[in-house]
Image (tube, grey):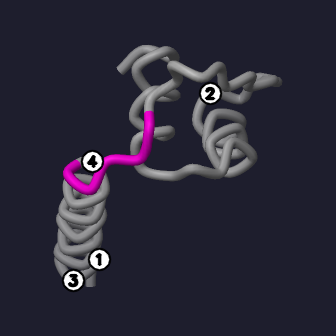
């Protein structure tokens, strides 16, 4: 996923630009200033649902990997 797609999806999940910037910094290890113009992506219930599903999937996978290591 490219940076623009990452920011777009972040804005569809959260209406907090600071949170989105922190996620960019953590993921891409770059400095960022985010300016949201009126036509910027808006929070979407569908995007939030997909994000929650992905988080749950990743959590399950990590648990499986840890279980297999032990």
Q: Of callouts 2 and 4, which one flags the residue occurring earlier in the amino acid sequence?
A: 2
Q: Residues within 10 Å of mark 2 (few under 14, many from 20)?
A: few
Q: For the residues carrying marks 4 and 1, which lies nearer the camera in this image?
A: 4
**Which region is colored magenta?**
42-46
- The image quadrant of residue 59 is bottom left
Look at mark 1 in the image and give the residue it sits on: 66
Q: Residue 67 carries which label?
A: 3
Q: Nearer the viewer, residue 41 or 55?
A: 41
Residue lying at 27% horizontally and 47% vertically, measured from the top left: 47
Q: Which of 10 and 58 is in front in this view?
A: 10
| 67 versus 53 height, above or below | below
Residue lying at 42% horizontally and 14% vertically, measured from the top left: 2
Q: Is residue 34 left or right of residue 70?
A: right
Q: Of callouts 4 and 1, which one flags the residue occurring earlier in the amino acid sequence?
A: 4
Q: For the residues carrying marks 4 and 3, which lies nearer the camera in this image?
A: 4
Q: Where is residue 42 in the image (x, y as percent from the top left)?
A: 44, 38
- Residue 60 drawn in magenta: no
How many numbered markers are drawn?
Answer: 4
Q: Which mark is residue 28?
A: 2
Q: Position of residue 24 (x, y in %)?
A: 63, 34
Q: Of callouts 2 and 1, which one flags the residue occurring earlier in the amino acid sequence?
A: 2
Disc 4 from disc 1: Cα separation: 28 Å
* Main SS category, magenta section: loop
Q: For the residues carrying marks 2 and 3, which lies nearer the camera in this image?
A: 2
Q: Of callouts 4 and 3, which one flags the residue occurring earlier in the amino acid sequence?
A: 4
Of helix, strand and loop, which one carries label 4? helix
Quadrant holding the C terminus:
bottom left
Q: Is residue 52 left or right of residue 22?
A: left
**Is label 3 in contact with label 1 (beta carbons under 8 Å)?**
yes
Q: Nearer the viewer, residue 52 or 69?
A: 52
Q: For the residues carrying marks 2 and 4, which lies nearer the camera in this image?
A: 4
């Amino acid at each position: 996923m490219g940076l623009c797609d990452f920011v777009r999806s972040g804005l569809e999940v959260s209406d907090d630009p600071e949170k989105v910037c922190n996620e960019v910094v953590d993921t891409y290890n770059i400095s960022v200033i985010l300016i949201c113009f009126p036509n910027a992506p808006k929070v979407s219930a569908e995007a939030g649902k997909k994000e929650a599903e992905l988080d749950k999937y990743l959590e399950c996978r990590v648990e499986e990997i840890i279980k297999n290591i032990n």
